Amino acid sequence: MKKLINWKLFFILTVTCVITACMVLPYSLALTSAEIKITPVFFLLTAAQNLVLFAVVVFFGLLLSKQLSLGLTILPGLLEGENKSKELKVILLPSIVLGVLAGVLIVLLSIPFNRLIPEFQDISISIPAWKALLASFYGGIAEEVLLRLFVVSLLVWITFKIKKTNGRPTDFGIWFSIVLAAVIFGLGHLPATAQIVPLSGIVITRAIVLNGIGGIIFGWLYWKKGLESAIIAHFSADIVLHIITPFVISLFV
């Protein structure tokens, strides 16, 4: 009997996403200056909430991506004992380079926005690097599972049902899904942003543009090279944004 999804992969992705969702807590609380202590009860409630969320996200992400020839390209083979070092070497450097490029572009484009919104200028500098590093694992893994494996796959599946070419999704449908997921990615940051500065047209535009840059690049990598590539790129971008850039800025202030 053919398995509905790869259950080993489901377990690993779900548990990893829950762990990284807990790892991001110190950064999230520091970013919003929320006076909340990470007590055992708070930690367990966060883990339980994310367990439910990501169990659903991973299940349908794996199910839909399997139908569309999207998804992961390396980890499934590793779980079966295959040697995937060659495939990893092929995607590693391009993924890091594109991730760093995404981070640099976001930093450069954030400059004019931050001049208009001074509240954003000094936030990341004041957050300890260890908290930013933990947050980078959440961004690289959990956000990619949510936005690319689930959201992009879902949107591609919808466009596939509307129009297909030779039994496959159209390039337009895939690009539409990547861009829409990138916009959703940007909008998804607004609740946290609202804790820092009142929402306005320029604040919303900033969230969509800056996060959209990464979303489009990571989405393209997901399409062409697999989720692992998007994860590596997103993690690399977050290192540039949350660790390297604040460190460099701190040298001049």
Image (tube, rainbow, N blue to C red):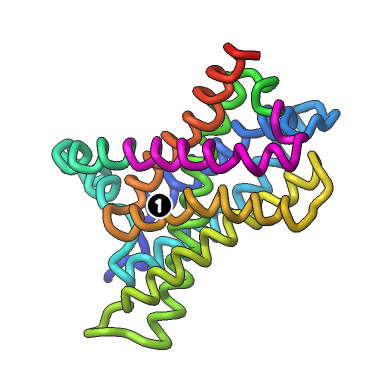
- The magenta stretch spans which residues? 97-122
Q: Name which quarter of the figure residue 96 lies in.
A: top left
Q: Is residue 179 above or below residue 134?
A: below
Q: Which residue is mark 1?
A: 217
Residue most toward the bottom? 162
Residue 2 x, y percent position in the rendering: 28, 69
In this orientation, which residue lies closer to the viewer: 43 or 194? 194
Q: Is residue 50 left or right of residue 10?
A: right
Q: Is residue 38 above or below residue 190?
A: above
Q: Is residue 55 above or below residue 133?
A: below
In this orientation, which residue lies closer to the viewer: 173 or 119? 119
Quadrant (top left, top right, bottom left, bottom right) of the N terminus:
bottom left
Is residue 42 shown to the viewer in this render? no
In this orientation, which residue lies closer to the viewer: 164 or 71? 164
Specify whether residue 118 is painted magenta.
Answer: yes
Residue 221 x, y percent position in the rendering: 33, 53
Q: Name which quarter of the figure residue 19 lies in.
A: top right
Disc 1 marks a residue whose amino acid type is: Ile
Q: Is residue 222 above or below residue 180?
A: above
Q: Is residue 21 left or right of residue 49?
A: left
Label 1's element?
helix
Q: Residue at x 60, y 48 (%)?
A: 51
Tell me which secondary structure the magenta stretch mostly adopts: helix
Q: Name which quarter of the figure residue 5 lies in.
A: bottom left
Is residue 102 shown to the viewer in this render? yes
